[in-house]
Image (cartoon, rainbow, N blue to C red):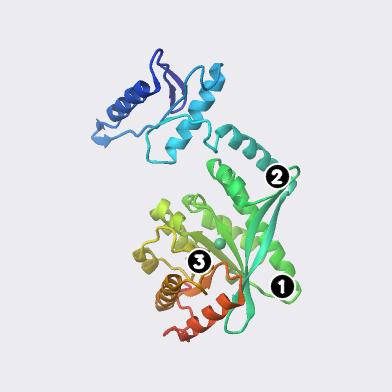
Amino acid sequence: MARLGGDEFGVVLPGLSADQAVEVFTGLRAELAREVVLEDIALTIEATFGLARYPDHGNSVDAVLQCADAAMYRGKHSAVGVVVYDGASATHPTQWLVVQAELRHALQRDELVLRYQPKLDLATGRVRGVEALVRWQHPRRGLLAPSVFLPAAEQSGLIEPLTAWVLRRALADQADWIAAGRSWPVAVNVSARNPESSAFAGTVTDLLEEFGADTDALVIEVTETALAVDPEAAARTVVELAARGIDIAVDDFGTGYTSLSQLRVLPVLEVKIDRAFVENLDRDEKDRAIVRAVIDLAHGLGCRVTAEGVETPQVRDWLAVTAGRSPYARSRPTRTR
Ligand code: MN
């Protein structure tokens, strides 16, 4: 057994089959999870084990360690405590390391770009704001979607400079629109990792100040998952941002884990219904029932509602009629701060 890093250990088990090794590690894991009392504080340790076999998974120490590392990472992202390397697993840490290194350069060289998606007011047909969507114009791989690079950014500290870059670019673009007579609020998506940082609300207000932008000019979109990952930290950040006058939207509502009690207590101004419920509205009666209910719920809570993924006139018309019939249709959002 050897210590490989701060909280990482390597164990060599000669002559065991994978099944036997899993058994050993499962026992070790249970042993570690046993409560110990240190200075009157009860502690339990959680450990994740990644397993790779020599020579099946590589014929050098480095190669085998890399596979074990990949398996361990997979274990960390699931409830499984002991994971045997499976060559097919897509998110290999060495790939992440490449993406992370390239992304660091991308931020310096301004290879990221923003695309803006309009949010329409269905009553007037006018654009009432836009959402900034980040893409990576990769020098060799072309235009990359966030799903390709955000996980690697979230795994490293890169998500903070990346979100700051998006905020900065969006506010700069917005200043240009305002100069052209269009005062659209801009919405920026934040990662589940951003609200974990206690400095995040400060970063956002500093940037607003730097650009001389009004707090009303910015909407921060937080996914339901972000609210669920670390509810206390997320709630603290959301409350802090709202206290500074920034509007908060709950993104992808309906597919994540926001409990209704969170929606009741958090200062959320906007609820965005996940596109999964919106796409087939014109055909699917169950989707219609859900969307109708979410519109009423959100309006009843004093929030405004945005439907994601409206791509046909049929869906738009259905939404306009339904929202118009909502019992709260005439009330304005009241939960800004
Ligand atoms: Mn969004």
Rendered image quadrant of residue 21: top left
Residue in view at x 37 percent, y 69 percent: 264
Label 3 or label 1, whichever comes before in sequence order? 1
The residue pinned by badge 3 equals: 249
Q: Nearer the viewer, residue 237 or 206?
A: 237
Inter-mark Cα distance, 2 to 1: 28 Å
Question: Which residue is the extreme one toward the top?
Answer: 15
Mark 1 Cα shell of 10 Å, populated few (<14), some (14-19), many (≥20): few
Residue in view at x 47 percent, y 31 percent: 71
**Image position of 231 with respect to 244: above or below:** above
Secondary element at image label 2 = helix
Inter-mark Cα distance, 3 to 2: 28 Å
| Label 3 CB less than 8 angstroms from ligand 1 | yes
**Image position of 138 with respect to 133: above or below:** above
Q: Nearer the viewer, mark 3 or mark 1?
A: 3
| One can see residue 323 in this view | yes
- Is 63 left, or right, of 71 in this rendering? right
| One can see residue 244 in this view | no
The residue pinned by badge 2 equals: 106
**As shown in the figure, which amino acid type bears the numbered disc 3?**
Ala
The residue pinned by badge 1 equals: 178
Residue in view at x 26 percent, y 36 percent: 41
Secondary element at image label 1 = helix
Q: Residue 228 location, x and y as percent?
A: 41, 55
Q: Residue 207 location, x and y as percent?
A: 62, 59
